[in-house]
Amino acid sequence: MKIPHNIILALMLLAATPGFANDIRREAVHFNAGSSGSTINSHLKGYQSVQYTLALTAGQKLSAQLDSRNSSLYFNITAPGADAALYNSSIDGNGTSITIPSSGKYTISVYLMRNAARRGDTAEYTLTLYAE
């Protein structure tokens, strides 16, 4: 069986193309003893994202505020095992207070929108989390 040259060339080019997978950093959030809140100062660039995990109990109120000079920086809050975000700041704004529907580890994902990520933008930010 003879393989056409254009197929071989296409496969070689595909193998040489770098992947565009997201660079995801994962960090657990723990409140200091006697505190029910935490302030995180960090940064990300391009397609990087950060997933903060926080153990919460059903009925708790979680407040989250994301501050950055980069207007393309957002966050999502996702419940344990969920496919869709419980809160999406690109739609609803960079601050919220939500009542936690079920106990478990929630994920707060901080990311740049695709247009900013594609440009390789950098975003310094402050994420403030408070659970009561």
Image (tube, grey):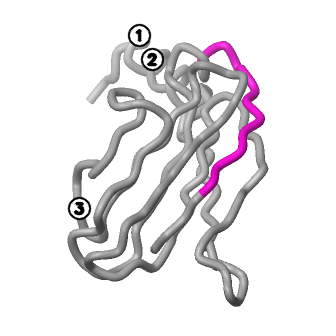
Image position of 86 (left or right of 62): left
Q: Name the residue under label 1.
A: 6
Q: Where is residue 62 in the image (x, y as percent from the top left)?
A: 42, 63
* Dot 1 or dot 3, earlier in sequence: 1
Proximity of marks 2 and 1: CB atoms separated by less than 8 Å: yes
Please state which of the two labelled residues, at mark 3 or mark 2, is closer to the viewer: 3
What is the quadrant of residue 12 in the picture? top right
Single out the mark in the foreground, 2 or 1.
Answer: 2
Residue marked by disc 2: 10
Q: In which quarter of the image is the N terminus?
A: top left
Q: What stretch is highlighted in magenta?
A: 118-128
Image-based side of 78 in relation to 63, left or right: left
Badge 3 is on which residue? 82
Residue 5 in percent (x, y) is at 43, 12
Magenta region, main secondary structure = strand
Q: Which amino acid does label 2 sit on?
A: Ala
Q: How would you rate the neighbour count of disc 2 (Cα within 10 Å): few for under 14, some for 14-19, many for 20 or more?
A: few
